Image: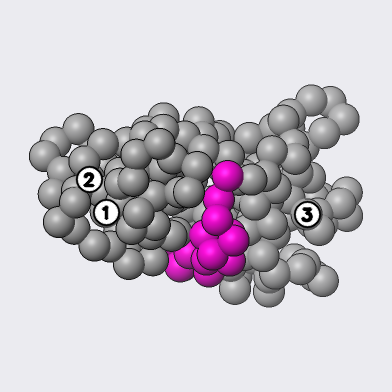
Amino acid sequence: MKDDYVIVLDFLPHGKASDRKAEPLVQVLGEKFFNLLEVVIRDDTEVKPKERIYIGGEKRDKVKYIRGRISYRDLTSFAKSELEEILIELMSKEEKKFVNVFNIAGPMSTRMHTLELLPGIGKKHLWDIIRERKKKPFESFKDLQERVEMLPDPRKMIIKRILKELEGKDRHRLFVGAGVF
């Protein structure tokens, strides 16, 4: 799954010190599939952290070419520090999509449910969520927290899960790459 738009995490005007050729480089996060990429920017262009840029198949105004995917450990310290805030902003723009995770997630096996992959959800919260969503689908994070007693902040759960996936700490993918949701 490819993203058409990415959010700039860090701009390196002269590339990385380890690069053979000095060219303007940005580390970015895919807007929908949360892929981490390095993208080379046109020489006459500057971008800022948190800026949304187009990398799709049509004419690109700021992007020279996509260098490729990178791993979390390849990110600069600044890019890592920006990541959580950018995820919060993306989540607030598409809250319904993320709330829907709690409405449609199903079992992975006879012993494990997809929701249990979210930090803070054990068997008790799992059954409370399933019981409440049968009555009526959740409409917002606020609705979810009001109807499921003692539930930790669902936004933070999802952000922690996305970061865990980006860091490669779990083989299951809910959000990063060709995620389920």
What element does badge 3 sit on?
loop
Q: Is residue 4 left or right of residue 90?
A: left
Q: Can residue 140 be seen in this view?
A: no
Q: Is residue 149 left or right of residue 174?
A: right
Q: Which residue is drawn at 13% across and 49% down?
A: 61
Q: Is any atom of residue 109 visible in this view? A: yes
Per the image, the residue denoted by label 1 is 53
Query: At label 1, which amino acid type do we have?
Result: Ile
Q: In which quarter of the image is the N terminus?
A: top left
- Residue at x 30%, y 46% (from the top left corner): 23
Residue 110 placement (x, y as % from top left): 84, 26
Q: What crowding class fits label 2: few (fewer than 14 Cα within 10 Å), some (14-19), or many (20 or more)? A: many
Q: Disc 1 vs disc 2: Cβ atoms closer than 8 Å?
A: yes
Badge number at residue 119: 3
- SS of the residue at dot 2? strand
First in sequence: mark 1 vs mark 2: 1
Q: Which residue in the structure is indicated by mark 2?
A: 63
Q: Earlier in the sequence, mark 3 or mark 1?
A: 1
Q: Residues within 10 Å of mark 3 (few under 14, many from 20)?
A: some
* Residue 56 image point, x, y percent: 24, 38
Instruction: Decide which of 40, 49 is in the foreground and name it.
Output: 40
Residue type for callout 2? Val
* Image quadrant in which you'd find residue 67: top left
Q: State the separation of the CA atoms marked 3 and 1.
A: 31 Å
- On the image, the x and y values in percent for residue 145 come to 68, 70
Q: Give the range drawn in magenta.
A: 74-93
In space, the residues marked 1 and 2 are separated at their CA atoms by: 8 Å
- Residue positioned 15% across, 56% down in the render: 44
- Helix, strand or loop: magenta stretch: helix
Quarter of the view holding residue 146 = bottom right
